[in-house]
Each structure stands twice: as C-alpha cells, then as structure tokens.
Image (tube, rainbow, N blue to C red):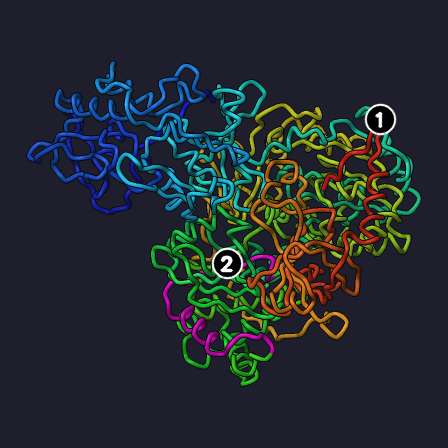
Amino acid sequence: MGYERQTDLGTPLVASDTQVACLIDGRAVTVPAGTTVMRAAALAGGSIPKLCATDNLKQFGSCRLCLVEIDGMRGTPASCTTPVVDGMTVHTQTPRLEKLRRGVMELYISDHPLDCLTCSANNDCELQDQAAAVGLRDVRYGYEGANHLEAPVDTSNPYFDFDPAKCITCSRCVRACDEVQGTLALTIDGRGFASKVSAGLASDSFLSSECVSCGACVQACPTASLQEKTVKAIGKPERSVVTTCAYCGVGCTFRAEMRGEQLVRMVPWKDGKANRGHSCVKGRFAWGYAQHQERILKPMIRETIDQPWREVSWDEALGYAAARLNTIRDTYGRNALGGITSSRCTNEETFLVQKLIRAGFGTNNVDTCARVCHSPTGYGLKTTFGTSAGTQDFDSVEHSDVILVIGANPTDGHPVFASRMKKRLRAGARLIVIDPRRTDLVRSPHIAADYHLPLRPGTNVAILTAIAHVIVTEGLADDAFIRERCDWDEYSHWAEFVAEERHSPEFLAAVTGVDAETVRGAARLFATGGNGAIYYGLGVTEHSQGSSTVMAIANLAMATGNIGRSGVGVNPLRGQNNVQGACDMGSFPHELSGYRHVSDPAARALFEAEWGVAIDPEPGLRIPNMLDAATDGTFKAIYIQGEDILQSDPDTHHVAAGLAAMDCVIVHDLFLNETANYAHVFLPGSTFLEKNGTFTNAERRIQPVRKVMEPLNGLEDWQVTQELARAIGLDWNYTHPSEIMDEIARLTPSFAGVNYDRLDAEGSLQWPVNEAAPDGSPIMHVDGFVRGKGRFVVTDYVPTDERTGPRFPLLLTTGRTLSQYNVGAQTRRTANTVWHREDVLEMHPVDAENRGLGTGDWARLASRSGETTLRVVVTDRVAPGVVYTTFHHPATQANVVTTDFSDWATNCPEYKVTAVQVAPSNGPSDWQEAYEAQATQSRRIAGHDSAMEPAE
C-alpha cells in the first residue's frame, strides 16, 4: 500500500446494544449510544478539526478545536466529549465555529516554530493539517514575548527525540503512557503557560526516567515533538506493508513504513487483533539487526571446526551439505540424521523442515525449541482438555474478574499483553501472583496484587495442590460445571486426594515457604471472585514437574468452572513469535502436524499419500537424546534452522560435547551464533522483513508475515530448505509459501479452512478453522472439551532431585528482561543494549552481605555442572536463599551452570531450579576466557581481516 495515516475516528468505540440517530451537517447517522459527536461525524464521512483527540485514548476535551453547534444547546460544546443524543442535529462548520477555531489555532502557532519546510514531520503533521483545515493564514498575536522556542531537545533515548519547542501540551503522550502502556512515566509539569511534558523528575531525561520506550507517546504525538530518529535521518515514508512482529508470542501487527528498500519505522497497526495498536520497545524499534554488519549473507563451508570458514556459492554449499548428509545416511543409517525447527521462522518454513527430515532424511528425529520451554504445555493441556494450546484470545482478559499469574513476568516477557492486563486491573479486576520473585505486577503504579505467593523455586505443584485443598474442603468447587463437563469419577478421586490433610496450606507451608493464610485467601478469591483467568509462563513449564504443574493448573480451572467463556481459561504465554506454530506444524519427534501421533496409521496414511514416502511409525529422538546419541557415536548429522542450542539449552558442556561429536552440523541462521562454533556448513537466513508466510501466536492466531524488502542473502528461508531438499534428491517445486499453506491445510484438520486469501481478507484466523468452526475459534471448549469430558489428573508433589546443601546452598532461577529477547541474537545488535548491557545476578541483601558482595561486584556463580562469573545487583526483589539471572549474553553463558534434570514427561529442562553457590570473584572465569578464545577462532572467515564478534 502507499503511505497514508490510518483512519482516526477521534474517540474510542463504545459498546452498546442501544442505537441512537442524529443529523450531522444534514447527513443521517446511527451509532451506539454513548458515541461522541466527533466519532459519529467521522463515521458519517466528516472530519471535525482536533488535536488532543485520538481514537485509542479516552476523550479529553482540552484543545478546543473540535467545537460544534447543536440545535437547542447553548454554546459551542466540544464534540469529543459530547455524546450523541437521539434526534440531535449537529453543525460542524459555521462562521462562528470558523472564527473560534482560527483563534485557538493562532494561539498554538504563536508559540510554535515556523520551520515546516525543514521539519522532519512536514506533510505528516496533524498541527499542520489542522492549521490548513481551519483556514489559518496569519497570526495576529505576533511571535514576540515569552515562548518555548529555545527549549533544548532531549536526545537521550536511542530511538526517538523529544523537542519541547514543538510540543503543544495536548497531553496525548501522557495519556498514552497512562491508558495504553500503563507505565505512567510522563506527566504535565507546571500550570498555564509554564505547562510542559516531563518524563519524571526535573532531573530526568527520557532515558533515565521510568519510560519503557514502547513508542505509545511517539505514536500519539500530533507534531514533531516526539519523533523517531530514523524519520529525521531518512525522511517521510513513501509506502507501507502490514506484517507481524517476530519477537515474542503476542504476535503484534505492525505497519512497516518504507522509503525505497529502507525501513523508516515500524508503527503498530490499530486493526491488529493481538496488540490493538500498541507495541513494545523490541517490536517498535529493535529491528536494526536485519542490516547489522555482523549478519552473514553468503553461504560458508569448512571441513573441520578448527578451520576458518570459506565463503562459497549457494550451489556449492548446498551440494557440499547434501553430499555429507547422503554419505552419513548411507554409512550409518537414516536415524544417524536429524534436525531442529525454528520457532522464529514461519509456519511454512517450519513445516518444510520437518517434512525434509521425515520425507528426505527418512527419520522422525526432529525437535524444536518448545522442547526447552513449552513442551509440558502440549502434554498437560492435551491430557486434560484434549488440545495442546491455550484456551482464550487476548481480548478475553478484558472480561476477567480475577487474574492468576503463575511463573510468568508479562511486563518483561509479553509487555503488550501485560499492558492490556494492567488496564483491566486498573478497572477493578483482582490479581494473584505466584512467583519466587517480586515482579512488576506485584506492585507498580496503580497496580497491586491482592496476593503475592513468593514460593520456593520448584514447589509449583505443592502450592497449586494447597489452593485446590482449600477450594475442595471449603465447598467452593463448581459442582454443576464439573458434573456437566468433566468426568465425575476422576474428579472425585482428585478431590479426595487434594482434600488430604497433608495437602493443606498449613502442612505445605514448610515446603512452599508461603504463609498458609495467604494461600487460603488467594484460593478463596480465585474460587469466588467471578471470572477467573490463569496465565502462566516458563516458570511453570521449566521444572522437573512442569507437565504436572500444567495439569494442576487445568484441574484448578475445571474445579472452579473457569473454562469455555470469555474472561476465564488457561493461557500459556508463549515465549517466541512462532513457538505455537512450530508445535502445530509437527516439530516434535512423536507427532505430525495437528498433534497426531506418528503411530496413528490413519494420520500417517495422509502424509504418505501426499508425500509419496513411508513415514516411520516410531517416534524419533528429542534434542537431549540427539546429543546423547552423538556422544555415543550413533548420531552423526543435524540441520538446525534458526535456533542456538549451545546458548539456549541447559548444561552447555553437554551440548558442546554432542555437537563436537557430530560429523556434519548445518546451521541455518542470520548470524554466526554460538552453535555455529561447531558447524561445518552455514546457510545464511532471512529476517521476517524479507519473507512471506504466517506466524501463530500464543492465542492460536494465524497471522500473515509479508515481505517488506528483498532478502539480503538472496533467498527466503523456505527457499533455502527447499533447495537443500532438492540437493539430497527430493522433487520439491513450491513457488510461493501460499502453496505450502495449502498443503498444511490438506494435512492438518485444525488448519483445514486456512488459506492466504482468507488471511488477507480477515487479517487473522484462530485455529481450529474447519467445518465445525469455519470462522475460527477465539475461545476453546465452549460447549465441551475437545477430548469429550475434561479429565482431572492427580498431581502429587515430588521434590526435584536438584537439592541445596552445604556446597550449594542457594537456588538459582532464570528469566528474561524487557529490552532483550531470548539469547539476544537480534536485540543485542540494536540500541536496546543501552538498557541491558550484560547479564547480572540479582541477590537478596542478606545473602549478599553474608558473602561480602555489593552491587557491581564480580561474583563466581557455581553449580554441580559448571561455573561462570557475572556482576551482582543487590535487591529485595528476590527472597533470601534465591538468586536470579537472565541468559541474553553469551559472555555469561548462564546455562553452563544449569543441570540436565528435566520434566518427567517431556524432557523440558529444569532451568528454574539449580543449586548454586556465589562467591566474590576478580572477573571472568578461566572457562569463560577459554570459551571466548575458542569462539573467536571458530568465527574466522577466510579473506576477512578479523573474526566476527560473538553473535549470540
């Protein structure tokens, strides 16, 4: 599409079953009761001048430009704050209004720079537009006297500038920060002529303030006062493409605005059903990695990992890779090969990778990053509900009365959804947080959890069983729902189990570390507070009892009747942009697309008929099994698309040993990541800006990814996989990802009604989309569970084998931070590093004092598996006995200390519980220095002067 602003109706949509009719400038219009005159006029095709109004913020009524005349009403009311009344007659353009509006606009312009021709917002400025709309031709007041024209520009933020000289004090930025983002970082300081936008204290800049750089203020600003630095550097966009963000599992819709092949800015799309026009710092601004100097654009090969890389043509690289794969298969058998699909790539690309492995390699040795994050979600929800995904859409939270967040930190990991959650909390919903750490949701501006249960890491099942004990023993279960929707015998068995005294909050307090009365209060609130919704993250799944915890959550939702309608449900917050889609596409070694087991003859028959090959009925190897088999000498080659298992997977020493033992490691990625240190073939990948396809977000929403620019490496990722398939002898001839989606739809019942034409027309679809649900399924299990009757599963608490003791007395848990994403491959190649330059170790003041450590000190972090060093931050966000770090920077390699303990059902690693000791250190450890030396040598490229910088 060309470049033009999205339609702005001035004030928000009002939901009402009552309709009212009026006349606006002689045009009849009917709108929901409560709709403002401004919005009604816009819907009728008119345009009332405005500056302080925009349709994603509540009406404010301060600019006085939107005055109208209404028959029978005195004065000239503001159209943005005046609701339509049935039978009302409105006039938006009269001589009286013309005079008033010009007078108001003169006042604005008298204290505004007259540099329109050289202003970076020229022809993209609402103030300029409205000055033209009211017919302003001169300013009677002159430009002498006191003004704000010499106010200094705040350039501290790496992505946008604040020029107070161009600010008209409309408060849109302040209101956006309050109403949309919920950070409340901005304010109007002073009164009258002295009023100005302030980012916190007088001494604060935008960078030093509590601003989280979500971009809501920049998007709201009607002038060039708040504007992206890229617009100033490149100029006004000339065209735009609507696409989907490639960061977290929220799946925000953006409009990529371009000049030629240069991306000028990413603007959140108001019609995006996941983000509703909002964004976070990553999706809005952190896209510069796509053209970073460290990106690899040419294929490379080498015989051994101690050699420098050699740049070659695509044909040579693919031929070399295919020859090694075929030789290994012929020598060691098909099960010596395998691959890992990417949760950052599209559904179509992921589907092709698992097809390559099954149809080309001849094995089910395929896995995905969900193995190390949400594989327990798939197992637990399929067991209890019958499907491996969350139950709600994101809009559902707007109807929740009680929100239970367990093992998730949405403000950092899923910030756009967190803003919607906080908006609901400010409107009166109640909140329960179960987390060892005091996250921002526990207490932040205008938000406070009713109950915070700071449990000991590893005791999720115990705390949920204690909550269930209260609900059952106090008669708070929804018996009517259970009898109608669930297996009553299984419920009775479960209820008898949780009612045992050994599962009471008092008995389990010694295990969980949470006061019994706090647990009882939280249980009563969730059971009796109305619509109860549960949101959880990796703090639930990344445990030895991850699958048990997911099933315990499902038990709790069913016991209280919180399934099958808006405002309730069980909602996993997925970490990566397409981790849901990667699972849907058949990336697990035991399942084909649509979660059908490979042992199912009917399912296999569909694929065998379509692909013309036999599918092995035996499940393949999971990622940890592949590494084990490699060190045993039976697994020889792996194709890894868009994942960095050396940095992201647990027990770094074990991963490195497995990769080093393989004869052929093919890495298909954007950068020379840590895993590529052990690779023999590097196939350069394409970014989300350079491809067509679809992503599926955490709410099962399938959304288009549209090509914004041509791939710098020459091929989209699906084309790379297709060419590798052809090189090993497969006859693949896809010409567009839409053809791959058509194949997915033929083979996958939940995608049966999905195609590109529908996605273009409707924007997105939520699976299942099939004959039973032709329009998709925003909410699952409405009339019954997919499996028939909901299944209650007894989940007995089993302590992890990872125990603290005299040598390792502390418990380490890990997580993410707002500005960085996963292993940091993308975000560390952007200005986001200004907020998070290194991983640090959070430590309680008592534990720090006992070890003589203070904020900024180097500390040795050691476990039974390994050790690393990093700087300390002393904080009471963590409890005594618990330490916390992130895993975004390879210099730290936090996973060198994590163990190989894993979930009993899925092998999901137990990242969240590692027994450690912390002691003072002088700096990086010997292992870190040796690792860096090996990585530097491995990244050498023949013909280049120096090795690449660390990529992940």
Percent of width and height locating residue 49: 26, 26
Q: Is residue 701 above or below residue 718?
A: below
Callout 1 secondary element: helix
Residue flagged by tag 2: what amino acid is it?
A: Tyr
Percent of width and height locating residue 252: 50, 40
Query: Dot 2 corresponds to which residue?
Result: 535
Mark 2 to mark 1: distance in Å? 48 Å
Task: Indicate yes or no whether the magenta region holds residue 541.
Answer: no
Q: Residue at x 58, y 55 (%)?
A: 388
Which residue is more in the foreground, 877 or 318?
877
Residue 78 appears in which quarter of the rendering?
top left
- Which circle's residue, 2 or 1, is located before the other in the chain? 1
Disc number for residue 595: none
The label nearer to you, 2 versus 1, is 2
- The reply, left or right, for residue 433 in relation to residue 80 is right
Residue flagged by tag 1: what amino acid is it?
A: Glu
Q: Residue at x 71, y 65 (%)?
A: 914
Residue 706 appears in which quarter of the rendering?
top right
Which residue is more in the foreground, 235 or 307?
235
Look at the magenta stretch and give its main secondary structure.
Answer: helix
Which residue is more in the foreground, 937 or 873?
873
Percent of width and height locating residue 840: 66, 53
- The reply, left or right, for residue 133 in relation to residue 154 is left
Percent of width and height locating residue 748: 60, 45
Q: Which residues are magenta?
A: 511-540
How many numbered marks, from 0 up? Answer: 2
